[in-house]
Image (cartoon, rainbow, N blue to C red):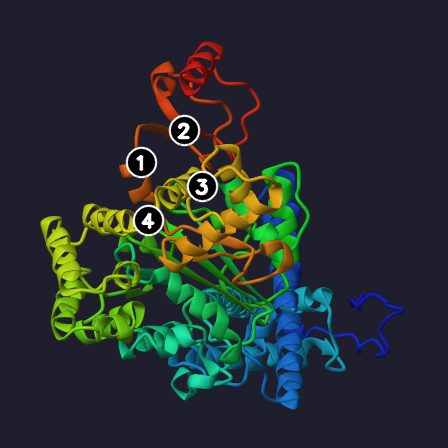
Amino acid sequence: MPLTPPASSSSLAPPPPPIRPAAHTREKTKDLRSRRDDGSASGGRARLARPRRRASGAALRQVVAAAGRRGQAREGAGRRGGRAAPSSRADLLGREDQPPSDPVRAWARRVGEAQDEAASVRARHGAGGQQLYVVRLVQYLLLSSGPDDAELVHRHLKSARALHEQGAALLDAALAAPQAPPPLLRQPEDLDESDLPAEATNAGPTVRARLNDMLRFLGDCDAALGVWGAGGVGKSTALRLVREVCGRVARFDHVVVVAASRDCTVAKLQKEVVAVLGLRDAPTEQAQAAGILGFLRDKSFLLLLDGVWDRLDLERVGIPQPLGVVAGKVRKVIVASRSEAVCADMGCRKKIRMECWNEEDSWSLFQASVGDDAIGRHPQISTLARQVAAECRGLPLLLVTVGRAMSKKSTPEDWAEALDTLKSSSQPISDKSTHALVKFCFDNLESDTARECFLTTALWPEDHNISKDELVQCWTGLGLLPEHADVDEAHRAGHSVLAALESARLLERGDNHRYNLFPSDTHVRVHDAVRDAALRFAPGKWLVRAGAGLRDPPRDEALWRGARRVSLMHNAIEDAPPARALARWRSRRNR
């Protein structure tokens, strides 16, 4: 009795007519059946062949169905026309906005040939060109010429599997390739003075060129940029300028600036990010990371990490991964560090070195910091001023702070004395040379009160935004301010000292994350190089572990012994310090 395909309620096509085997095939059928019966009696091999043939038929049916779906998808993509840059496998498979590469073109040609061969098989054994019945295929293989057709189908299946693997490899390679973000709104070179802060326009062509490089990064394929150079060379200033200008050249939903200090931890970095984004605090690092991730996952953002000393695990912080262009959203990071190796550890393929300023740019910045009136008071002062500027070694931080300290020098003798002092401590650019110049500026403050108040700013964590009111309260509590009849007078005296320290450029304007003010008149910060110098030449012994991520106080009594100032603020300490050490410290302090 001839075999016919099973009825299907979902198929509208009538069943195909039965195939009547030819006379020469009936003998082959009897032979195959006799082999099968023999195999059944002896546990033979024919029984094992049947599942393989069924599997081959099912696999061929899957290949043919996939080929049909691919053809429909290709036709639909052709109707839709060009598409945006892909951000997923589905987008990449339908992409037709760029010409394919040679390997992709060759693979597509082989796929087309395989589709044609599969369509030929389907036309011979399908029902109305719509459905392929495995039973009819098995019948065809059993009742036709047999081994030749089976070998042909096996060869097609093997070729289809190879094409599938090659296509997957090409797709993975395409997804791994960097994707370009949207074009910049404006080219950095087209920004005029009205688009830039005064700090950028007065900095000279070298700084403007570095700023342009950083802004161009916002429109290229790289996801992370490293900015490295000596302390005080202007890395923090460059990040601040990028934050203020980036909105004119690129679109980001959020621009996040955080200071990753020397003792930075995941929890501390999370706290900074949460403060900038205005999110709620979470009880654990994992919960906080989940909150940050959920907020930033579907947004374009620019993360500016300042003062990075070691590699940071941004994924643990909650920063969405991978960086780059994902689902049409741009994720970019700029890392500022003193070390090029740290930038590389943070995944920065592209790096910019911040060089010390050349002689002319240095002189322009120094002259602006001193003031034309001070330099023009005597003909000799101009010559001496250029020599003083040269001692700053082209570091903008020192050019500004030393320039402000020299603004009060009115005679050639004062300038000559200052030049001798600077030369006596002159040495190649290093932390020690920076400390010596900061010490010079410190010594030139107007009063002992200003000097003592300045040193206390080192009690806060590195790169911390310090509230001015909190700082004045600290000075009042330590008895550093002159005694006043009421609190308002003491408050005004404290803010007068703050103004003097800001004028000397030993304090910088900070940020107020709570009110989204960048920068802010309510907060100040101390440059990390200046803070290091303050801790070095502070009188007596200071125990400062602020913001170090401590969960327990230092247990070594030797650290407490003889300490004049102790700061363990902004840690997660729950237990009190050793009672004996604390009692000794209090007794010495009260003497």
Where is residue 100 shown, x and y percent of the image? 45, 82
Crowding at label 1, few (<14), some or many (≥20) Cα neighbours within 10 Å?
A: some
Judge whether residue 32 can be spotted in this image.
no
Q: Earlier in the sequence, mark 1 or mark 4?
A: 4
Q: Specify whether 14 is left or right of 107.
A: right
| Nearer to the camera, 125 or 429 | 429
Q: Nearer the viewer, mark 1 or mark 4?
A: 1
Say what amino acid the circle numbered 4 marks: Val
Mark seen at residue 461: 3
Q: Amino acid at mark 2?
A: Arg
Q: Residues within 10 Å of mark 4 (few under 14, many from 20)?
A: many
Q: In the rendering, at what x and y percent does residue 167 appear?
A: 49, 69
Q: Which residue is mark 2?
A: 565
Residue 413 or 185: which is nearer the viewer?
Answer: 413
| Residue 71: percent from left, percent from top | 63, 81
Using the numbered discs, state the Cα–Cα distance from disc 2 to disc 4 in whole angstroms: 18 Å
- What secondary structure is marked by label 2? strand
Q: Amino acid at mark 3?
A: Pro
Quadrant location, the N terminus: bottom right
The CA distance from mark 2 to mark 3 is 14 Å
Of the numbered discs in the image, which one, if any, rests on residue 530? 4
Q: CA distance from mark 1 to mark 4?
A: 12 Å
